[in-house]
Amino acid sequence: MRTIQQPLTEKGLSDGPGRIEQKPNANTNRQIKETYSRKEWEELMGLNRPTYQKQGGTVRRKR
């Protein structure tokens, strides 16, 4: 008695139940990690941006 898997493997539509999938090589998928200095992190987060304060009716730079 034939199963539904046999005609599929004959036509090349399926590799069958015993097929083992190859895992990608871990060494080829490695990405180089970038390291940032403290100054670069502060610049990215916007710590060195000028700050403003409302004094009376005008907006002035904070000291």
Image (tube, rainbow, N blue to C red):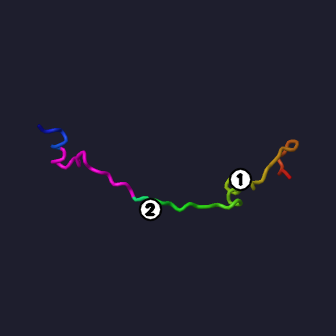
Quote the CA–CA distance across marks 1 and 2. 36 Å
Q: Nearer the viewer, residue 20 or 48?
A: 20
Q: Position of residue 62 (x, y in %)?
A: 84, 50
Is 8 situated left or right of 39 in this image? Answer: left
Q: Residue furthest left?
A: 1
Is 24 situated left or right of 4 in this image? Answer: right
Q: Which residues are magenta?
A: 8-24
Placement of the N terminus among the 4 image quadrants: top left
Membership of 40 in magenta stretch: no
Residue 58 vertical placement versus 42 (above, below)? above
Q: Nearer the viewer, residue 52 or 20?
A: 20
Query: Mark 1 against mark 2, which lies toward the viewer?
Result: 2
Q: Nearer the viewer, residue 10 or 63?
A: 10
Residue 58 vertical placement versus 39 (above, below)? above
Instruction: Check disc 2 and report the residue beneath it.
Output: 27
Residue 8 vertical placement versus 36 (above, below)? above
Q: Write down the quadrant of residue 48 in the picture.
A: bottom right
Q: Looking at the picture, which amino acid does disc 1 mark?
A: Gly
Q: Residue at x 87, y 44 (%)?
A: 55
Contact flag, marks 1 and 2 (Cβ < 8 Å): no
Q: Residue at x 84, y 49 (%)?
A: 60
Membership of 15 in magenta stretch: yes
Q: Residue at x 19, y 50 (%)?
A: 12
Q: Looking at the picture, which amino acid does disc 2 mark?
A: Asn
Instruction: Check disc 1 and report the residue beneath it.
Output: 46
Residue 57, labelled with which disc? Answer: none
Q: Position of residue 37 (x, y in %)?
A: 68, 61
Q: Write down the quadrant of residue 29 in the picture.
A: bottom left
Is 6 situated left or right of 29 in this image? Answer: left
Q: Which SS does the magenta portion mostly show?
A: loop
- Number of numbered markers: 2
Crowd class of label 2 (few under 14; some 14 to 19; many from 20; radius 10 Å): few
